Image: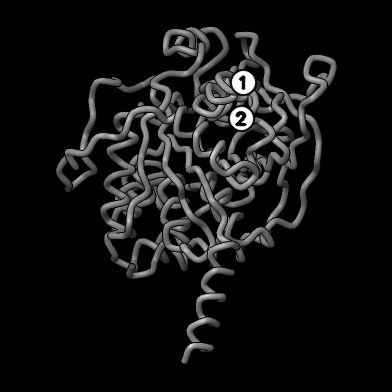
């Protein structure tokens, strides 16, 4: 019996040692791709440990994003990581700049929180307000977590990079203490999805993305629109998840069915896995079939190309580390993982 117990303890210790510690940075809407990524990771405790959730402005303002995150966490009925409010606005970009950009250079496909009132926080449809408030100090939490576990923390970035950029500006020494950065953002070989030139997360806060891409973080893994555009969700895939009828899949149905892309009213619509690809990769990196490595930068001169992803002129950031840009994937393999984890009863 003693030998059996000792053996089990060794197995549990080995499993704990293999778990990846993650800071989950998000601009989550009602559910969408950020919510899917959170559910997938929360339902994989043998693989990942979410040290904390940090909320940033992007799809919605942080107050609304925090409410949506709390609602998803409550539906999961699992031990909850701490949730911290982060940057309330981008570093420089404003709603006024976005409106003027649309006037000068054409309508935006999506402006995110710039189209919402930051003072308004609504409950999830059919629910009451959770009554919960995030903790203050997302940037301090990021710094202290990385300092306590140097070389062990993966930063999963699913929104604009404002929180991480502020942490790097406050404490440049943590750059090399981050294990790796895995992020959804940017576009290199394909058009944008906020403006015609720029992907939304980079467009919402280009200055923050530039700070991060020019940093010395040892490993940067990019899920840009180049790979995300190859992971579409059609009505058939939507139905396979929505028809499971669990609390999580009912929220999925409400969001993707009645909001973007609106499958219930527009069955020919197309959505994308987007941020959930970055989360899924932490669980199964093998679904990516092609990648390329290069030095990347973001244009921060306000104009038609604001937020665009470009090659880095290494003279301006000679110590920057390269970015591994994911390009193609085995969609069936990625979607099978996505469907399995979203449709579980608990």
Quadrant position of residue 149? top right
Percent across and percent down for residue 110 are 46, 27
Name the secondary structure under disc 2.
loop
135 with respect to 210 (left or right): left
Q: Secondary structure at mark 1?
A: loop
Which residue appears at 51% of the width and 22% of the height? 204
Q: Is residue 96 above or below residue 334?
A: above
Q: Which mark is residue 307?
A: 1
Most distant residue in the left direction: 128
- Find out whether the residues at labels 2 and 1 contact each other: C-beta distance under 8 Å: yes
Residue 282, position as x, y percentages in the image? 59, 55
Distance between the alpha carbons at the discs numbered 2 and 1: 9 Å
Q: Residue at the location (55% across, 19% down)? A: 170
Quadrant assignment, res 183: top right
Name the image quarter holding the C terminus: bottom left
By what rule are the colours in the image chosen? one colour
Q: Is residue 27 visible?
A: yes
Q: Position of residue 167 (x, y in %)?
A: 54, 25
Which x, y percent locates residue 290? 77, 52
| For residue 98, side relative to residue 212 (left or right) | left
Q: Is residue 334 above or below residue 325?
A: below
Q: Nearer the viewer, residue 135 or 159?
A: 135
Q: Nearer the viewer, residue 32 or 104?
A: 32
Q: Which of marks 1 and 2 precedes in the sequence?
A: 2
The numbered mark at residue 192 is 2
Q: Nearer the viewer, mark 2 or mark 1?
A: 1
The answer to whether residue 268 is seen in the rendering is no
Label 2 crowd bin: few (<14), some (14–19), many (20+), radius 10 Å: many
Q: Farthest residue in the bottom direction?
A: 1
Residue at left offset 60%, top offset 62%: 18
């Amino acid at each position: 019996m003693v030998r059996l117990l000792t053996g089990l303890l060794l197995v549990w210790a080995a499993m704990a040692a293999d778990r990846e510690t993650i800071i989950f940075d998000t601009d989550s809407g009602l559910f969408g791709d950020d919510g899917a990524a959170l559910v997938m990771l929360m339902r994989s405790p043998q693989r990942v440990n979410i040290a904390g959730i940090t909320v940033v402005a992007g799809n919605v303002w942080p107050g609304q994003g925090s409410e949506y995150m709390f609602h998803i966490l409550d539906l999961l009925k699992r031990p909850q990581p701490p949730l911290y409010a982060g940057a309330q606005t981008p570093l420089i970009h404003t709603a006024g700049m976005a409106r003027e950009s649309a006037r000068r250079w054409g309508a935006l496909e999506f402006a995110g929180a710039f189209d919402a009132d930051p003072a308004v926080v609504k409950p999830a449809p059919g629910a009451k307000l959770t009554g919960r408030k995030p903790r203050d100090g997302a940037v301090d939490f990021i710094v202290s977590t990385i300092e306590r576990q140097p070389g062990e923390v993966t930063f999963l970035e699913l929104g604009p990079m404002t929180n991480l950029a502020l942490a790097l500006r406050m404490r440049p020494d943590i750059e090399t203490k981050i294990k790796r950065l895995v992020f959804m953002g940017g576009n290199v070989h394909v058009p944008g999805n906020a403006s015609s030139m720029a992907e939304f997360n980079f467009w919402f806060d280009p200055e923050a993305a530039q700070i991060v891409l020019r940093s010395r973080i040892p490993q940067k893994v990019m899920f840009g629109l180049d790979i995300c555009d190859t992971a579409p969700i059609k009505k058939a895939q939507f139905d396979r998840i929505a028809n499971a009828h669990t609390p999580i899949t009912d929220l999925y149905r409400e969001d993707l069915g009645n909001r973007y892309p609106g499958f219930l009213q527009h069955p020919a619509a197309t959505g994308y896995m987007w941020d959930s690809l970055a989360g899924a990769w932490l669980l199964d990196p093998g679904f990516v079939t092609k990648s390329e490595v290069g030095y990347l930068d973001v244009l921060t001169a306000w104009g038609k190309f604001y937020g665009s992803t470009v090659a880095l002129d290494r003279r301006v950031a000679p110590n920057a580390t390269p970015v591994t840009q994911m390009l193609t994937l085995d969609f069936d393999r990625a979607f099978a993982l996505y469907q399995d984890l979203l449709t579980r009863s608990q």
